[in-house]
Image (cartoon, grey):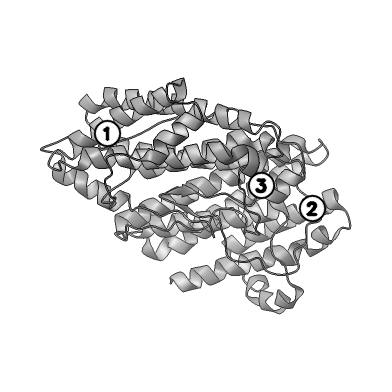
């Protein structure tokens, strides 16, 4: 499985900022906007019915970004929103990191950071244009821009939060020079923007880590290694394509692999997780809402409102015994994220259902409280929508029991928390 080495961010960086704040400046941020991508072209498959549970997720959200989701089947069906969402979520995570680090900045670094950001954005734009152009006669062409944006966002996330990464310094790398020559990029605009970004960003690192004489060289090499991989991908693109992997993954975004195990770091990870899953859930819901005919829209919209009411009530109930404690934000946002992922599964029609699990539903159907009433209201309304839209298809017939199994997971998670 593809992987990214995730670097700890929140606790480590925040502690360094506190120690260095009196003597030096603050940390590094970035804010970059994204390019437009291909429009969505298809509704989700109406009668998707997985017969066996899906394997563990291979989409990893962490401080190193979001790896490629399972887009291959959707792309083959002419659906490009999956790749677009990948670019959007990586941009969102990058922006969330930016917002948190920004709170630690002092005014003198703002101008320098803005210059570095501008250079990086210009580089990202031109590099992705080049990659897309090189893929113009391949099946990957429609999603090339989105995939490129996502991968460069991930690179930038890693660059933003490098803490004590160990690298081997090299004065010269012949592969780097050779690739520039083979691609005819040595004096190009895109390479110039990257070199400007490298210089500007590493000057900030030099100021931030003024007592480490090797920091400037380490920064230059770290960015050069990322650029080397980007050049290798660019060179191989016409023959290799985007090298997307085909696998089955659970919908949504798995829990963050949070390296910082302090309560502050765990709370921050949970907030990032809930915000990114909420973004995906809203995006998928929006696709449905836009493409449904008017006869289905009211039922669908009411079901969404009922689900939101249930989600808030359930997560508030879950965190109630801990509401005065430091772990309250972590528990609350983890709860939101898990329910967002379950809603994504239902919207995509790929929630796992097994009739053998039906006997386990007794704890769901026997509960009587306010949260359960909100759940049943949502269940009734959403299954009404599926019945109207899908008719007698398998998906709509399974709806009540399928949703009950989701509610059972929520109740089990609550019991495990307590």
Sequence-wise, the earlier of marks 1 and 2 is: 1
Q: Nearer the viewer, mark 1 or mark 2?
A: 1
Q: Nearer the viewer, residue 264 or 33?
A: 33
Residue linked to disc 1? 202
Could you say where residue 155 lies in the image, as x and y percent from the top left? 43, 42
For this view, does 200 lie left or right of residue 71?
left
> Does label 2 or label 3 sit earlier along the sequence?
3
Mark 1 crowd level (few <14, some 14–19, many ≥20, 10 Å Cα) = many
| As drawn, 352 above or below 280 | below
Q: Does the residue at mark 1 contact the one at mark 3 (Cβ under 8 Å)? A: no
Q: Is residue 323 visible?
A: yes
Q: Is residue 235 left or right of residue 397?
A: left
Mark 1 vs mark 3: in front: 1
As helix, strand or loop, the secondary structure at mark 2 comes to: helix
Q: Secondary structure at mark 1?
A: helix
Position in image of residue 65 (x %, y %): 46, 47
Quadrant that contains the C terminus: bottom left
Q: Which residue is mark 2?
A: 386
Give the residue at mark 3. 304
Residue at the (83%, 48%) spot, across then down: 389
**Residue count near mark 2 (Cα–Cα under 10 Å), binned few <14, some 14–19, many ≥20:** many
Q: Residues within 10 Å of mark 3 (few under 14, many from 20)?
A: some
Q: Which mark is residue 117?
A: none
């Amino acid at each position: 499985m593809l992987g990214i080495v995730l670097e700890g961010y929140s606790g480590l960086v925040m502690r360094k900022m506190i120690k260095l704040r009196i003597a030096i400046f603050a940390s590094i941020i970035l804010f970059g906007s994204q390019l437009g991508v291909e429009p969505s072209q298809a509704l989700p498959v109406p009668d998707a019915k997985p017969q066996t549970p899906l394997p563990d997720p291979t989409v990893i959200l962490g401080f190193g970004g979001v790896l490629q989701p399972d887009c291959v089947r959707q792309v083959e069906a002419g659906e490009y929103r999956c790749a677009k969402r990948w670019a959007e979520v990586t941009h969102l995570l990058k922006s969330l990191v930016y917002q948190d680090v920004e709170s630690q900045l002092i005014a003198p670094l703002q101008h320098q950071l803005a210059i570095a950001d501008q250079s990086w954005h210009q580089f990202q734009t031109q590099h992705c244009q080049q990659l897309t152009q090189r893929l113009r006669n391949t099946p990957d062409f429609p999603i090339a821009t989105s995939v490129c944006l996502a991968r460069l966002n991930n690179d930038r996330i890693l660059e933003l939060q490098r803490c004590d990464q160990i690298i081997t310094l090299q004065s010269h790398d012949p592969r780097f020079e050779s690739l520039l020559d083979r691609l005819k990029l040595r004096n190009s605009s895109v390479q110039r923007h990257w070199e400007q970004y490298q210089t500007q960003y590493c000057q900030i690192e030099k100021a931030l880590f003024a007592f480490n004489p090797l920091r400037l060289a380490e920064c230059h090499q770290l960015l050069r290694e990322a650029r080397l991989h980007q050049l290798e991908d660019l060179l191989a693109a016409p023959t290799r394509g985007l090298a997307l992997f085909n696998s089955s993954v659970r919908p949504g975004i798995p829990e963050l692999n949070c390296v910082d195990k302090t309560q502050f770091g765990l709370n921050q990870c949970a907030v990032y997780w809930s915000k990114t899953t909420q973004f995906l859930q809203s995006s998928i819901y929006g696709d449905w809402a836009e493409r449904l005919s008017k006869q289905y829209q009211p039922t669908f919209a009411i079901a969404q409102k009922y689900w939101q009411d249930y989600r808030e009530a359930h997560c508030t109930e879950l965190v109630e015994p801990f509401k005065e404690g430091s772990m309250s934000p972590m528990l609350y946002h983890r709860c939101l994220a898990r329910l967002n992922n379950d809603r994504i599964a239902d919207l995509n029609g790929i929630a796992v259902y097994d009739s053998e699990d039906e006997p386990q539903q007794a704890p769901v159907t026997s509960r009587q409280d306010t949260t359960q009433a909100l759940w049943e209201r949502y269940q009734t309304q959403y299954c009404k929508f599926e019945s109207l839209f899908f008719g007698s298809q398998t998906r709509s017939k399974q709806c009540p029991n399928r949703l009950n199994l989701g509610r059972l997971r929520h109740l089990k998670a609550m019991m495990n928390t307590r």
